Structure formats: C-alpha cells, structure tokens
Image (cartoon, rainbow, N blue to C red):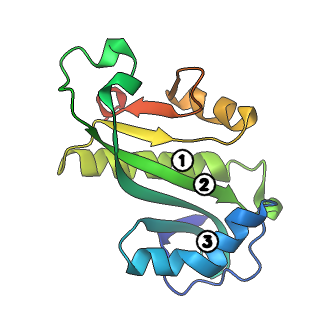
Amino acid sequence: MFIIEPLKAQDRKDFDCGEDALNRYLRERATQDIKRRLNRVFVAIEEGKSQVIGYYTLAATTVEAEKLPPSHTKHLPKYPIPAALLGKLAVDKGWAKQGLGKLLLANAIRRVQVLEKEIGIHVLVVDPLTDDLIRFYTPFGFLHIPPERRLFLFTDGIAD
C-alpha cells in the first residue's frame, strides 16, 4: 500500500529514477523550492516506511490562450489563462512498471480537481521531455498539439 503526501522529512537519499536531474532535484532543491513557495512536492512512500519511491511537483502557471486548441478558446479572454503545472513526475527504478507513475498522476489530477473548485484553474499542463512520456500522458486525456511538446488537460474534462 502506498501513501502520497507532501514532502517533509521522508528519506530521499537513495531515490534513483534513472534521470540524474530528477534525482538531484528531489535531494537538493525540492525543500528550497517549497520554502520559497515556488511549488509543492508530493512523495509516494510505502505505508510504514519513509523511503521516497516516487514524487511529483505542482505549481501555478499561466498559458497564453493562443497556445490552446481553438476548440477550447472560443469563450476565453486574450490574456493569460490560469493553469496548474505538473512540473516533475518520477518513480524510483525499483518501482518502475508497477503502476506507481499512473497512481502519482491520478493523485496530481485529483489535487488539481479540488483546487479548481477553489481558485481559477482552466488547464493542467505538463512538458514531457520525450515521446515516450507524451505517450504516457495522452491516455489520461492530455491533448498534444504538435509541434509543441506541451500537453494540456482541461479542467472541464476532469470527471468528478
């Protein structure tokens, strides 16, 4: 059983997702970004343990309306649209291919769904670095509008 909670004092020194930048971020910069209120970091741990086995970050951002597909901009103003950014999502190599990434993504979407009821959020965006990651996100309803790598999940499309 997994628990997903805000990053606090969980053990992250052995976290290894295979991507050095994501490993370093969790170990060296995540706490600083939280203190500076730049984002929030949520970690997955096994129940009763403290070792981080996965994490994701959420932050506020905006998106230019002209960057969105025309089908979603008909009634939008021409100024930047409020959005949430799923900045990072990583799973420890020892937990890869076990559905933890999907569980983390579902948790992030649920958090955005709750926030959307309290503040203006029109879309959840993610900037996947690879084509494999684009393929990971699209089954969850994220729209890919080439040639951009950015993906969009509109909050009106998130089921309650």
Decide if residue 104 is in sight here.
yes
Amino acid type, label 3: Ile
Extreme residue in the bottom direction: 9
The residue located at (70%, 73%) in the rendering is 24
Label 2 sits on what residue type?
Answer: Leu
Question: Mark 3 against mark 1, which lies toward the viewer?
Answer: 1
Residue at the (32%, 34%) spot, across then down: 155
Quarter containing the N terminus: bottom right
Give the labeled residue for mark 3. Answer: 45
Q: Are marks 2 and 3 in contact (CB under 8 Å)?
A: no
Q: Secondary structure at mark 1?
A: helix
Q: Quadrant of the C terminus?
A: top left
Residue at 47% in and 70% down: 5
Q: Position of residue 131 (x, y in %)?
A: 73, 32
Q: Amino acid at mark 1?
A: Leu
Residue 112 vs residue 64, the one in the foreground = 64
Mark 2 Cα shell of 10 Å, populated few (<14), some (14-19), many (≥20): many
Q: Which residue is mark 2?
A: 89
Residue 140 in the image: state x and y as whole percent: 53, 31
**Disc on the earlier residue, 3 or 1:** 3
Q: Is residue 48 visible?
A: no
Q: Residue at x 68, y 47 (%)?
A: 99
Q: Does 76 sit left or right of 67 as displayed?
A: left
Which image quadrant for residue 67?
top left
Q: Which residue is mark 1?
A: 105
What is the quadrant of residue 49 in the picture?
Answer: bottom right
Residue 41 location (% of width, % of height): 48, 67
User: What SS does tag 3 mark?
Assistant: strand
Rounded to the nearest angstrom, the CA distance separating label 1 from label 2 is: 8 Å
